[in-house]
Image (spheres, helix red, strand yellow):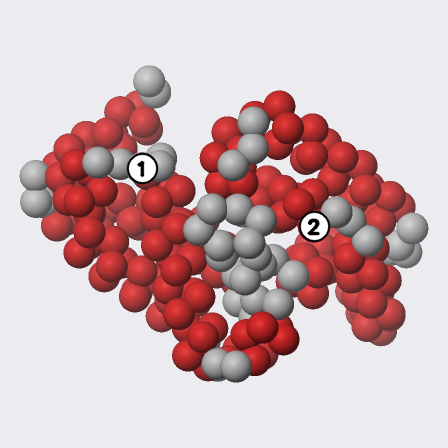
Amino acid sequence: MNANEHHTVELLHRAAAGDAQAVNELFARYRDRLRAMVRLRLNRRLQGRVDPSDVLQEAFLEISKHFAEYVRAPTMPFFLWLRYITGQKLIAIHRHHLGAQMRDAGQEVSLYRGALPQASSVSLANQLLGRLTSASAAAGRAELQIRVQEALNSMDPMDREVLALRHFEMLSNAETAEVLGLKKTAASNRYMRALERLKDILVGLPDLGDPA
């Protein structure tokens, strides 16, 4: 166990004993990863209307409320529990704002236990173009966006979700397998297949990989 893992375990013990500051520190450790998940899975209709920080605040309140219960009988690794609670808050916000439009929006993925809002091809394409397109390609961004979305939509839905978890949420292979209910080897194989497909997508796009 490295120093970081040891400190996390120490914080978990303190939090389980009722130390509110330890709960704050634990949540702060994973805030950036959780924020990335919220941004990736926030429906585009709500962007500009819903601040990811508000989702995280609601999640923190829920996590604080149920922390002792989790520690007594953990059903999943700690970060995945934080992610699950945050995802449930995100679903509630989607339902509140979108209501009957939820089904049409294809907003929940039933591919895995504890369905969360999907990482849509729109969100994934935005992430890719945001990271990889140069300023000179800005004029052609709309066309690139469509081409990337079409390519992502051609992927197997489970492979696309594995890509979202590993490449954009930065989950480990073990965490991805846990989330999706897959064996580790199956999760790894799907990720490698998704990466190959992603490479095919990127090779066909102009100006990608140039410094911004």
Instruction: Name the residue beneath numbered marker 1.
Output: 75
Q: Position of residue 15 (x, y in %)?
A: 15, 41
Give the label on residue 185, or none: none
Element assignment for label 2: helix
Nearest the viewer among 110 and 83 is 110
Instruction: Name the residue beneath numbered marker 2.
Output: 157
In the rendered structure, the answer to whether residue 86 lies left or right of residue 18 reads right
Q: Is residue 1 above or below residue 87?
A: above
Q: Position of residue 188 (x, y in %)?
A: 64, 28
Q: Residue at x 31, y 37 (%)?
A: 75
Q: Position of residue 4 (x, y in %)?
A: 32, 28
Element assignment for label 1: loop
Which quadrant of the figure has residue 182?
Answer: top right
Q: Is residue 1 above or below residue 115?
A: above
Quarter of the picture holding the N terminus: top left
Quarter of the picture holding the C terminus: bottom right
Q: Alpha-carbon neighbours of circle 1 within 10 Å: few (<14), some, or many (≥20)? A: few
Mark 2 and mark 1 in contact? Answer it, CB < 8 Å: no
Q: Looking at the picture, which amino acid does disc 2 mark?
A: Pro
Is residue 211 something one can see in this rendering?
A: no
Nearest the viewer among 72 and 20 is 72
Is residue 69 something one can see in this rendering?
A: yes
Nearest the viewer among 133 and 147 is 147
